[in-house]
Image (spheres, rainbow, N blue to C red):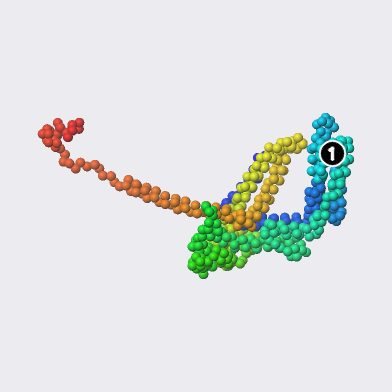
Amino acid sequence: YDEVMDTQRKRVYGKRQQILHDRNCKIEIIEMINAQVLGAVERFLSDDYGAESFAEFAANRLSVEFDGGDFTGLSLEDAISLARERAIKNIPSIIQEGMDENLAEDEDPKDWKWQEMARVMSGRYGLKLTEKQLKQMGRDNLPGFLQEEATKAVMEIDLNEGRKFLEREWGLESLIDWMRQKFQITLPAEELRGLTDSAVNDLISSRVREMYRQKEVTFPVEVAMATHMAEKTAGPGGQQKYDREGLYRWARSRFGTHAEHLQEQDFRTESRSRLKEVLLEISKSAYPTIEQTAIDAQVDSALSGAAEAEVEDAKELCDWMKASYQIELDPTKVAGLTPDAVRQTLWNAFDQKYRPEMRSMERSVLLGHLDSSWKKHLLTMDHLRSVVGLRSFAQEDPKTVYKKEGMKEFDTMWENLQDRVTDSVFRMEDAGQEAFQEALWAGQKAQHEQAQSYVETATKNESEAATNAASEKKKEPIRNRIEKVGRNDPCPCGSGKKYKNCHMNVNQPI
């Protein structure tokens, strides 16, 4: 059991350590998006998807399990006929199960559960049976009566709504609906109709990248407006609290030369909506026109077949980054890195300059969902471990079952993690802004603590320096400034006695 958990733990904590050690989170999220798009295209455009959808629809209506392959290639009429035939054939077994449980022959008729039998059949087939009605039929006549009533109910169920599932456009419409819900992207069916699965995947992926780029442009402005010009504060009353000067300083600092034309006076007088519009235009102009993914092609070209970057390759890549993105990099810090490490370094450099807010958000989203998913998975594995021993009664090895089902649950956890992460990325304004504010607050707190620590350290050093200086000063010996009195001289106290008989004796007061 521990080996299974150890394998899963290494994978989860390994991924977590990569993120904490500056693994580029955008690369991770793009890989998740690509995997989900590919999976959706394969699923919705599959020849069996329509048949599987009809099988699920018929199962919900008729309360009978169907296999999607049963309806592949069938017309609506044939599919409905087959579904009803299977449902009618299943009625006798349902009746027998109900009678064995509620009207068992080996029980006293006084203990028969007529009301429960009526409830089971009514709930299954939508009948309106009563306890009195079943008792009047008697146990021996009950199977024939229930068979007839259930058959009528099955034949009356309308399955014509399942027509859309068997039409050729159903898979394409489902894919379009999935894109709209998942990525808020609307694509007309005309653009996808007639394309191969690979072409559809490429088209959707390109649209998702465009949407991602739009988020990268708008997100810093959304965060700045929420920070400096929130429409409602979290305090009592929830009133507006605008920091127009703070927004102006942020814009000048964040966008550099692209914001040089901004005037502080405009930020004092313009409306909130107008300021947001202006900042969005600046953000769009400040974001590079060359896609960030172009870095991958450049790295592949410069390091093709190489195990690590040589000095010349590193210089070539750094020059390209400067020419393409105006990003200064030290070639000595790139030389000697593996191609993947070079890629991570260049992507991180791009993020730090052009998308620091998104970078912080992606990191927060990944870590947050990874931690929550892992905690839930641990509870699932604990439950599995507590019940897997019962599988031995079915002549199964509990350890083998635990390993198989545990890894299946782990794969499901990973798929759900990817789904939640990509959902959060495309709904950052709703789900992610609070997390970003927490990260921003944490950064400010760290700076404050660093400054406070510096002051405390400086004060302590000054105090120690003063103490050391005082201790290092040479101590002067105690000197007797008064002329020494002889033993036989008169005592200075004026008693008239000799000093040896007066105050030379320390026990005598002066």
Query: Residue 155 vs residue 194: left or right?
Result: right
Q: Residues within 10 Å of mark 1 (few under 14, many from 20)?
A: some
Measuring 76% from the left and 35% from the top, which residue is drawn there?
A: 393
- The part of the image, by quadrant, that contains residue 396 is top right
Q: Position of residue 81 (x, y in %)?
A: 87, 51
Query: Residue 414 vs residue 107: left or right?
Result: left
Measuring 65% from the left and 60% from the top, which residue is drawn there?
A: 305
Between 508 and 88, the residue placed more toward the observer is 88
Query: Residue 176 vs residue 265: left or right?
Result: right
Give the vertical position of 392 relative to 315 (above or below): above
Q: Position of residue 278 (x, y in %)?
A: 56, 67
Query: Residue 373 vs residue 439: left or right?
Result: right
Q: Position of residue 366 (x, y in %)?
A: 61, 52
Between 407 and 297, the residue placed more toward the observer is 407
Quadrant containing the N terminus in the rendered view: top right
Amino acid type at image mark 1: Gln
Residue furthest to the bottom in view is: 261
Measuring 85% from the left and 56% from the top, which residue is drawn there?
A: 75
Q: Position of residue 318 (x, y in %)?
A: 57, 63
Between 267 and 481, the residue placed more toward the observer is 267
Give the vertical position of 155 relative to 2 (above or below): below
Q: Write down the residue under mark 1.
A: 133
| Residue 455 visible, this orientation | yes
- The part of the image, by quadrant, that contains residue 211 is bottom right
Q: Secondary structure at mark 1?
A: helix
Quadrant containing the C terminus in the rendered view: top left
